[in-house]
Image (spheres, coloured by chain):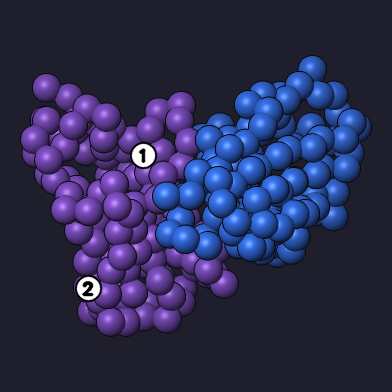
Chain colours: A purple, B blue
Amino acid sequence: QVQLVQSGAEVKKPGASVKVSCKTSGYTFTGHYMHWLRQAPGEGLEWMGWINPNSGGTNYAQKFEGRVTVTRDTSIDTTYMELSGLRSDDTAVYYCVRERGAWFVYWGQGTLVTVSS
Amino acid sequence: EIVLTQSPATLSLSPGERATLSCRASQSISSYVGWYQQKPGQTPRLLIYDASNRATGIPARFSGSGSGTDFTLTISSLEPEDFAVYYCQQRSISITFGQGTRLEIK
């Protein structure tokens, strides 16, 4: 079965960077786009970007352009999301999500990133 | 950016009642709308895709309709497990979500 397992919670200071990993299994890694979304405490869902694991091509939401980088390592079926220039309003749960038929079906368990001085 | 506006923000109903949730887009998005359910402490679950298609394993009491700018999620007869937050999402131009509708027990 499809599984997405994310790295553990992080606490970062303002201005720092964070890198979250998403280890996949149960399907052909290069066969499906992987997206990154986030959800601030008590708030809604926000899409950040996607990666095509086959080509490495990426597409980011305009809001995050220049601050987010999504990469992958096909040797270990893992994608990464790095967010730089962290601010307090970046405190959120970050999710990797695999699409099926262009919709969000398979979710990682989430990684809480807390930005605090 | 396409803005999705969901209404109402909160809907208070009783089990057995019919729920109607609305999602309005700032411009036409054809039928590229999905609906998700999120319960506390859980990840969202896809209910409806392409405006009116039920996702795998979703009960028939959930239905979606609409095209262009106005979309509706209907739950025909509420079960206790349906009380949750519902989000619409568009993938016509980039990807955005509505702010959510909280469906609570009256």
Q: CA distance from mark 1 to mark 2?
A: 22 Å
SS label for mark 2: strand
Disc 2 chain ID: A
Give residue B22's position: percent from left, percent from top: 71, 39
Give residue A91's position: percent from left, percent from top: 28, 32
The foreground one among A83 and B24 is B24
| Image height of B94 relative to A47, above or below | below
Residue A73: mark: 2
The foreground one among A14 and B31 is B31
The foreground one among B1 and B17 is B1
Residue A93: mark: 1
* Residue beneath the point at 14% across and 46% down: A84
Q: Is residue A23 visible?
A: no
Disc 1 chain ID: A
Q: Which residue is most to the front?
A: B27
Identify which amino acid the numbered label 2 is placed on.
Asp
* Residue beneath the point at 67% across and 32% down: B7
Identify which amino acid the numbered label 1 is placed on.
Val
* Residue beneath the point at 40% across and 71% down: A33
| Image height of B12 relative to A26, above or below | above
Give residue B72's position: percent from left, percent from top: 74, 46
Q: Is residue A81 left or right of residue A17?
A: right
Which of disc 2 and disc 1 is earlier in sequence?
Answer: 2
Q: Quadrant of residue B87?
A: top right
